[in-house]
């Protein structure tokens, strides 16, 4: 049974809407056995830290049995645990300990493809009349060439010729990740059974990997080219097909048989992100998946105007009964701290970003280490482990820079492992680490903790209305979060210059949390001077 903190006893509190979700890349969080690779016991050993942060749920990137070509996103057994991460017993222990602490556990679920080592694929490729042949997408070539022009997300054709049976199979990602055929009912049922297995075990839901890719065009039509160049194409016939959206509804039906569980969709798009795509997976709100990532903020440049536009666009597309969520960093698209080249004043921006993430409307996702301001690391060629980085170096150095080990202490290997870490620890760990920030009341870590506590104390922040007051045009975003009598004003200055926040009317406010003002100070404001990179939350008399 989950232990309830007082705010969770409120009957209107819905954990996946109002709580905070923490994304762990298990390989890099904490290593308990010294092999240099993070593991489940490592996470268990850090539970006190997660409790002190105040998060409500963990999302674990995949820990299933996998040849690790794409570090777990190539599953060879959905019911097994990769021995590098531990055993099924460790997973059960982690689940029990999380639940005892009132923390939910969300697994990653990869429905678009398996590993090429999965027994289903081994059977499927073994002969054209194998009963599992149709579980994957096989096609004849066209005059010795691939069946059509579809491109893999990882570059090159999405088709791989398999000499065993003389046909091509399709892969949206690496060729080691053959795509499953969602038009085959038996296959779909088998995957639903794999999900049921985990739901029966008690996990609290799934993050659905690349959910918008699962169904492809029945007629295998060529994708239109962008700018007439074969290298660039609009993935019209392989993404966001109506049937993928329909299957999202079926997933919801399955999950809803288990009260309190959740499905969160990764709606994979490259820039420019189109929020309406993500929103479509929410259905009317109750017949689609519960949450879907929109990556617009990740692709926005740091400016109040750009952020405001991305946020309001996203809200505008959320169906009536639906709920938004917010993500600034992840294991693919890098950390928001220094995502853009030539970033300056990162410390200050990270604080404004933390205030934004934890005060706007929608479920916040924190990527491990963002709460201490971890940066994208600079890695040398021989340190790269991501196959994407190996393939495209030096044009693209891969995704490892956002996957370096969690920085716990200033000691060697940042307290992540007593062994040799699988990826180097970022050099800045001697100054940027949990231990040094833990006791420093002004640290970023304590800003995150305070913001999370504020959400717990003031339900308006976690679930109230969102009423924009300033739309970023003057470098400032300001909005009210209100619920019943409670009304909080948030002012965020994205710029390194002092600004004046011109509010429409006088507001009386007392500071609840601020990067610059003293908590408890009261102000009567209309034209209010805002410090460079100031972020402040006020309790107000607004009604
Ligand atoms: C998702 C994952 C990414 C993985 C890909 C293929 O986008 O987040 O890490 O490489 O799917 O599974």
Image (spheres, rainbow, N blue to C red):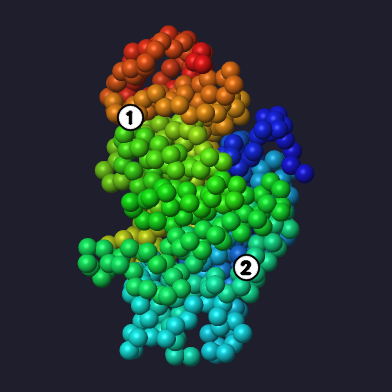
> Residue 505: percent from the left, percent from the top?
39, 12
Q: Which residue is mark 1?
A: 472
Q: Residue at x 71, y 54 (%)?
A: 257
Please indicate, yes or no, whether residue 62 appears anywhere in the rendered image. Answer: no
**Residue placed most toward the observer, 46 or 116:** 116
- For residue 191, the mark is 2
**Residue placed most toward the observer, 30 or 187:** 187
> Residue 87: percent from the left, percent from the top?
68, 63
Asked if residue 82 lies left or right of residue 259, the reply is: left
Q: Helix, strand or loop at disc 2?
A: helix
Q: Residue at x 70, y 30 (%)?
A: 10
Q: Residue at x 56, y 54 (%)?
A: 207
Label 2 crowd bin: few (<14), some (14–19), many (20+), radius 10 Å: some
**Residue placed most toward the observer, 8 or 222:** 222
Give the mark, 2 or 1, whose residue is nearer the N terminus: 2
Asked if residue 224 lies left or right of residue 439, the reply is: left
């Amino acid at each position: 049974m989950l232990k309830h903190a007082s705010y969770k006893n409120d009957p209107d509190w819905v954990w996946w809407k109002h709580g905070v979700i923490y994304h762990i890349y298990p390989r890099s969080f904490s290593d308990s056995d010294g092999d240099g690779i993070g593991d489940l016991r490592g996470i268990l050993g850090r539970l006190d830290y997660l409790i002190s942060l105040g998060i409500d749920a963990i999302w674990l990137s995949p820990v299933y049995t996998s040849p690790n070509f794409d570090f777990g996103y190539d599953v060879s057994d959905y019911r097994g645990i990769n021995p590098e991460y531990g055993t099924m017993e460790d997973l059960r222990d982690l689940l029990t300990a999380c639940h005892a602490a009132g923390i939910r556990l969300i697994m990653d679920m990869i429905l678009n493809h398996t590993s090429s080592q999965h027994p289903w694929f081994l059977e499927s490729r073994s002969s054209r009349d194998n009963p599992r042949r149709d579980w994957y997408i096989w096609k004849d070539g066209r005059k010795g060439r691939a069946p059509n022009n579809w491109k893999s997300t990882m570059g090159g054709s999405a088709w791989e010729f398999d000499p065993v049976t003389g046909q091509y199979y399709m892969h949206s990602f690496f060729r080691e990740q053959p795509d499953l055929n969602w038009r085959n009912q038996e296959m779909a049922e088998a995957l639903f059974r794999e999900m049921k297995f985990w739901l029966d075990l008690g996990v609290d839901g799934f993050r659905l990997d690349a959910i918008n890719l699962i169904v492809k065009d029945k007629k295998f039509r060529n994708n239109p080219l962008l700018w007439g160049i074969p290298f660039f194409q609009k993935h019209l016939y392989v993404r966001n097909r109506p049937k993928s959206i329909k299957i999202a509804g079926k997933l919801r039906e399955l999950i809803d048989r288990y009260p309190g569980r959740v499905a969160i969709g990764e709606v994979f798009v490259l820039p420019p992100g189109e929020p309406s795509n993500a929103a479509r997976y929410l259905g009317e709100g109750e017949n689609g998946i519960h949450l879907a990532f929109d990556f617009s903020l990740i692709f926005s440049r740091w400016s109040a105007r750009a952020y405001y536009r991305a946020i309001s666009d996203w809200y505008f597309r959320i169906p009536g009964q639906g709920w938004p969520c917010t993500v600034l960093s992840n294991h693919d698209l890098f950390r928001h701290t220094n995502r853009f080249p030539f970033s300056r004043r990162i410390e200050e921006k990270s604080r404004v970003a933390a205030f934004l993430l934890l005060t706007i409307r929608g479920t916040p996702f924190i990527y491990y280490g963002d709460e201490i301001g971890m940066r994208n690391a600079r890695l040398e060629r021989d340190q790269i482990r991501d196959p994407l980085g190996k393939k495209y170096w030096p044009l693209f150095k891969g995704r490892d820079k956002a996957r370096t080990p969690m920085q716990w202490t200033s000691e060697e290997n940042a307290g992540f492992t007593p062994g040799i870490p699988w990826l180097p620890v970022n050099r800045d760990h001697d100054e940027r680490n949990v231990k040094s920030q833990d006791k420093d009341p002004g640290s970023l870590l304590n800003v995150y903790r305070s913001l999370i506590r504020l959400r717990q104390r003031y339900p308006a922040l976690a679930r109230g209305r969102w009423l924009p007051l300033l739309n970023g045009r003057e470098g400032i975003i300001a909005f009210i979060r209100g619920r019943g009598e409670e009304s909080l004003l948030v002012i965020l200055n994205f710029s390194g210059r002092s600004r004046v926040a011109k509010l429409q009317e006088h507001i009386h406010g007392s500071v609840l949390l601020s990067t610059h003002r003293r908590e408890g100070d009261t102000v009567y404001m209309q034209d209010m001077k805002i410090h460079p990179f100031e972020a402040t939350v006020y309790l107000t008399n607004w009604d």
